[in-house]
Image (spheres, rainbow, N blue to C red):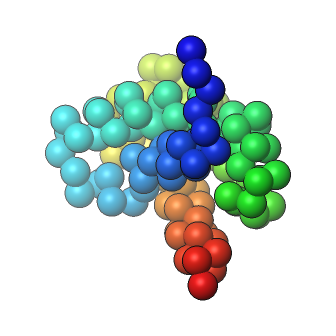
């Protein structure tokens, strides 16, 4: 199996954050299930892993603040018990709201970071 390029890793990182942000509350249950319970779940394990984050940081795709907040996001998401990875908990629990707000914050920081790189 081929290793993903840094550009692909960056896109997967961005996609992971986009799958779990405050906009999720306006989505229907099928979209939440796909975005959070499938895509975000796998992204947390892969693209928010310290090895992936280190590659992104060392190569200038994220800054230290995004790196550290992403590690925190991964830890918080993985601390949610498996029986709380469901739509009801995503919509109503404080632990999920914390994860979603942190993901949203990182996504906004990443957008600003990326826009400064293109100037």
Q: Is residue 47 above or below residue 82?
A: below
> Which corner quadrant of the image does residue 37 belong to?
top left
User: Do we see residue 95 in this rendering?
Assistant: no
> Which corner quadrant of the image does residue 1 belong to?
top right
Query: At 39% across and 60% down in the image, what residue appears?
Result: 22
Left or right, residue 45 beside residue 96: right
Left or right, residue 93 beside residue 72: left
Left or right, residue 58 beside residue 110: right
Left or right, residue 86 beside residue 65: left
Q: Is residue 79 above or below residue 17?
A: above
Query: At 64% across and 44% down in the image, what residue appears?
Result: 6
Question: Is residue 95 or residue 104 the one in the foreground?
Answer: 104
Q: Give the x, y percent position of residue 104.
A: 50, 61
Count up the numbered dots. Answer: 0
Q: Is residue 40 above or below residue 114?
A: above
Q: Give the x, y percent position of residue 57.
A: 77, 53
User: Do we see residue 38 in this rendering?
Assistant: yes
Query: At 60% across and 84% down in the image, what residue appears?
Result: 119
Question: Is residue 20 or residue 85 the one in the foreground?
Answer: 20
Q: Give the x, y percent position of residue 72.
A: 71, 47
Query: At 45% across and 20% down in the image, what residue appears?
Result: 83
> Which corner quadrant of the image does residue 92 belong to?
top left
Single out the residue that lies furthest toward the bottom. Answer: 119
């Amino acid at each position: 199996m081929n290793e993903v390029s840094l550009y692909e890793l960056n896109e997967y990182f961005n996609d992971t954050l986009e799958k779990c942000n405050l906009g999720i509350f306006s989505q229907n249950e099928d979209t939440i299930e796909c975005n959070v319970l499938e895509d975000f779940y796998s992204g947390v394990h892969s693209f928010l892993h310290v090895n992936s984050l280190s590659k992104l940081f060392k190569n200038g795709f994220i800054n230290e603040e995004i790196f550290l907040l992403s590690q925190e996001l991964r830890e918080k998401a993985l601390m949610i018990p498996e029986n709380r990875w469901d739509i009801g908990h995503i919509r109503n629990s404080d632990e999920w709201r914390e994860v979603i707000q942190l993901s949203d914050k990182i996504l906004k920081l990443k957008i600003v970071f990326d826009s400064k790189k293109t100037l």
